[in-house]
Amino acid sequence: MEKTYVIKGEPESEWLLVDANGQRIGRLATQIANYLLGKHKPNFTPGVKMGDFVVVINSAHLAITPKKMTTKFYYRHSGYPGGLTTTSLKDMMRTYPDRVIRAAVWGMLPHNSHGRALLKRLRIFAGNDHPHGAQNPKSVN
């Protein structure tokens, strides 16, 4: 039986810059989820917070097909009877384009405390500007 590799010490994290301009939502979300989990590193260990911080810019300029804009919906429930609220992708892109990427990435992360901690390392901005210039994020294609 093989032993599981566990990294010793505190893993180092980098800051990555991802440009969402003209990209598909699913392919972009899988790329971001892999960076957050740390699967791109050779010493990847499951369950250890060893991924990088990810800054996403231009989230308002995703490439989405017109059919998906009208047929995809986001649901949330208030907890009260009749409290289901549906929002179409078209409305979500108009008001909160960052939440579209956040919801897609959250669907690809573990749904537990580890996944919630990883999601806090994701910063999404609708435009081209971001306040994380001091961290010197490396651009990723």
Image (cartoon, grey):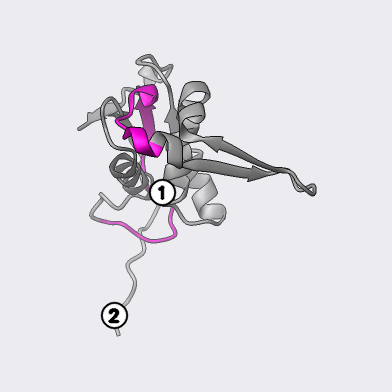
Q: CA distance from mark 2 to mark 1?
A: 24 Å
Residue sitting nearer the eye, 101 or 121: 101
Residue sitting nearer the eye, 86 or 9: 86
Kind of element beneath mark 1: loop
**Left or right of 25 in this view: 83:** right
Q: Residue at x 57, y 54 (%)?
A: 113
**Left or right of 64 in this view: 110:** right
Q: Quadrant of the C terminus?
A: top left
The residue that mark 2 highlights is: 2
The residue that mark 1 highlights is: 10
Q: Position of residue 121 (x, y in %)?
A: 46, 37
Segment tinted magenta in the rendering: 43-68
At label 2, counting other C-alpha atoms closer than 10 Å, the crowd grade (few under 14, some 14-19, many 20 or more) is few
Residue sitting nearer the eye, 103 or 50: 103
Q: Residue at x 32, y 47 (%)?
A: 30
Residue sitting nearer the eye, 121 or 64: 64
Q: Is residue 72 above or below residue 19?
A: below
Q: Quadrant of the N terminus?
A: bottom left
At label 1, counting other C-alpha atoms closer than 10 Å, the crowd grade (few under 14, some 14-19, many 20 or more) is few
Residue type highlighted by circle 2:
Glu
Q: Is residue 24 above or below residue 125?
A: below
Q: Position of residue 78 (x, y in %)?
A: 73, 43
Q: Position of residue 124 (x, y in %)?
A: 43, 28
- Do we see residue 121 in this rendering? no
User: Going by the picture, which residue comes out furthest to the top?
Assistant: 129
**Left or right of 108 in this view: 138:** left
Q: Quadrant of residue 131?
A: top left
Residue type highlighted by circle 1:
Glu
Q: Position of residue 75 (x, y in %)?
A: 59, 44
Q: Residue at x 39, y 61 (%)?
A: 46
User: Going by the picture, which residue comes out furthest to the bottom?
Assistant: 1
Q: How many marks?
A: 2
